[in-house]
Image (cartoon, rainbow, N blue to C red):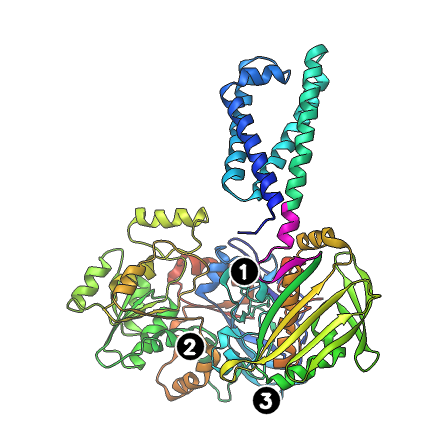
Amino acid sequence: MTQHDATTARLGRALGWASLGLGLSMTFAPRTVTRLAGVDDSATARLMTRIVGLRELVHAAGLLLGPPEWVWTRVAGDAMDLPSLVIATARRQGSRRMRAAMATAAVAGITAADTYTAVRTLEEDIGKGRGHEAHRNGALHLEAAVTINRPPEETYRYWHDFTHMPEFMVHVDEVQVTGDRSMHWKAEMHPLNKTIEWDAEIVEDRPNELIAWRSTESSDVPNSGTVHFGPAPGGRGTEVRVDMEYAPPAGRAAVAVAKLMGEAPDQQVRDDLRRFKQVMEIGEVVRSEGSPEGPHTQRLMHQRPARPMA
Amino acid sequence: MKANCWMGMADVEVQDVPDPKIMNDRDAIVRITSSAICGSDLHLYDGFIPTMKKGDILGHEFMGEIVEVGREVTNLKIGDRVVVPFPIACGRCNSCQRQLYSCCENSNPNAGIAEKMMGHSPSGIFGYSHMLGGYPGGQSQYARVPFADVGPIKIEDDLPDEQVLFLSDIFPTGYMGAEMCDIEPGDVVAVWGCGPVGQFAIASAYLLGAERVIGIDRFPYRLRRAQEKAGAEVINYEETNVLEALKEMTAGRGPDACIDAVGLESHHGNPAMYAYDRTKQIARLETDRPFAIREAIMACANGGTISIIGVYGGLVDKFPLGSLMNRSLTVRTGQCHVQRYMKPLLDRIRNGDIDPSFVISHEMGLSDAPKGYRMFRDKQDECNKVVLKP
C-alpha cells in the first residue's frame, strides 16, 4: 500500500468519522436530518435520506478501514449532493430556503475539505516510495536498472559520450559537450511541449564503473544523478543502475498532469534504459507499427493500429 | 495491399492498407505466398487477449519471398523463399543466446504493458496484440519482418508451401510440447486438444520415441484425424470419463507426460462445470478457463511432466497446486522458441519423417479470411486448418 504522511492519514480518518456520524443519523433518524436541511417531510425524502446515509456509511468504512484514497468516494458524493442542494435551495421559500442554503454552504465547506485531502493523496501517489520514485525536498527521486548483454567497458564508454543521449532518451533533443567536464542539454518537456535547456557538469567519473553529474547552479531544472556500470554475475554483461533526482520545472502539479497523460517519470526512466539496452545490444531502437518511436511511455496508452503507416 | 484486420470481437475484415516499409536496418519485406489461421488467432477473434486495437493486421503463420532488405541483412537477398517464425527475436540478448527466442528482451517495444500484466515481458509476436509489440501480422500480401538476419529460414528446394508453412508455428510448437516431456522408452503421453497443434504434438511424441500417445478432444472429426493421421489412441471427453479411462489404459499409473494443447478457451463435458468458469470469465474474475490443465494435472503419473503449449493470457482459478506439489510433478511450458526448431524440423520434412501438410483441411483466398475464421471457430465443415492464399 502507498505510504502516506501523517497529516493525510489523519485527515482521511477524520472525514471517515464524519461520514460515520452523518451516515448513522441519516440512516436511523432521517426525519431529524430532513428537518434540519429544510427538506420536505415526505416518505420519498426519508427514503432518499436513508439511501444517501447508506452511501455515507460506505465512505466511512473505506476511510476508517482502508487507505485515505477512499476520500475520492466522498468527492464523488459531494459532486452528487451539491447540485441537488443548489436546485433545492432555489425552489424553497422563507425559513426553509434559509435552512437549505445553510445546508448547501455546509456541504460546500465539506467538499473543499474532501477535495483538499483527495489532492493530497494524489500528490503522494506521485511521490510514492515504491522503490523507483520518491520525493526528497520537493525533488523527484528516480531509480531504475537494466541488465545489458555487453561488457561494462563498452556500456560505460557509450554513455560517457553524452552526445549519444538523444538516441535513447526520449525527451532529450541534443547534448553538446562544452568542455572537459561540462555539457549543455536541450530537452522537450511533456505535456507542455516546451523546450528546456540547462548546463551540467560531470562531478565524478570512475572509468568502467560510474559517472555522476549535476546541473550547474543557473539551471532551470536542477538535476543530478549517478549511473553505475557493474559486471553482471556469470558473464551476463553489465548491470546498469541509474539513480537521479530532479526538480520538475513546472512543479509537482505538472507531474500529476503528466502522469494522467501516461508520462510517469519512473516509467520514463525505465523506458530510456530499455532503449539504451537496445542500442547497446542490437545497435538501434526497436520500432513497431504500433509504437513507431520505439519504447515510449506515452505510446503505451496511445498505440497506433498494428498496420503499416501511409 | 490487402490485409485481414481485427475490427472487434468476432469481427475481422479484409481491408486495403498501405504497403509495409523498412523501419529498422535488420528488417526485410516479404511478399507473402501462404499464411494460415492459428487456433490462438481465435483467442483474439473471441476477444480474450487484451490490448487489441481496431485495424490491427492479424496472422503469425506466414511465408513468402523476400522483396526488400534493410542495410544490415546480409544473409538474405531479394527473391529468397523464406518461412517466418512467429516470435520476433533479436538474436543478441541473453535470452536469445540461451535460445529462449520467445523471451527475447528487445523485440517488444511495448514491454512496459506486458510487465504490468506478467511481471516481465516476453518477445514481440506478429499480429498478436499491442501488449506483445503492436506488430502487423502476415494475413496480408506483404509483411515487414524485423531481425530478418536471424529469424526466417530459407527454403532452398522445391518443397511446396503446404509442407513448410507450419514451420512458422504449429509444427515446432507441437514438437516442443513433446520435447519438453523428456520422453523415455515405454512412456505413455496424453495430449489434451486434438486441433492442429495437438496433432503435431502427438506425431512429435511418436518421433521422440513415446510408447503410446492418447489424444483427448470432443469433436469426432478431430479425434479421427488424431487417430488416422497421427496414430493416437483417442478419448472423447463428452462420452468418457477421462481420468478413469486414462487410469484404465495405464493400469493405474496415469500417463507419464500430459500435454495441454488447449489453452484458455477449454471446455468441460459437464455443462454445470463449464458454466461455472465461463461465468467467472465473463465477470472477469478469471481471464482463462482451465479445465484441460486441471484435468491434465490430476491425470498425470506421480513424478510425471505437465507440458503446456496451449496459450494462456492471465489468471486462472481452482488450480490443483496440491496435486502438482504432493506428487512431484514437473511443469514445462513456453511460447515456442521456433527459431530453435526450424532447421532440424525442416530436415525431418526433407527426410520424409513427417509431412506437415496432413493438418490442412481448407485452402482459400485471403479475401475469404472472415469466412475462414468463422468456419474454424464454429468447427464447420470439419474445419481443421485454414491456409490463406493472397
What residue lies at 49% left-to-right and 83% top-to-bottom? A234
Residue A149 % position (x, y): 57, 81
Chain identity of mark 1: B
Q: Which residues are magenta?
A: A121-137
Say which element carries label 3: loop
Which residue is tagged 1? B116
Question: In whole angstroms, how far apart are the C-alphas of marks 1 and 3?
Answer: 37 Å
As drawn, is A94 to the left or to the right of B61?
right
Type of the residue with mark 1:
Lys
Q: Is residue B130 above or below residue B97?
A: above
Q: Nearer the viewer, mark 1 or mark 3?
A: 1
* Residue hosting label 3: B75
**B387 displayed left or right of B30:** left
Amino acid type at image mark 2: Pro
Task: Decide if residue A73 is in sight here.
Answer: yes
Q: Nearer the viewer, residue B375 or B197?
A: B197
Residue B218 appears in which quarter of the rendering? Answer: bottom left
Residue type at the position of mark 3: Asn
Say whether mark 3 and mark 1 are on the same chain: yes
Q: Percent x, y for residue B178?
A: 34, 75
User: Which quadrant is home to the N terminus of chain B?
Assistant: bottom right
Question: Mark 2, chain letter?
Answer: B
Give the residue pinned by disc 2.
Answer: B172
In front here: A49 or B219?
A49
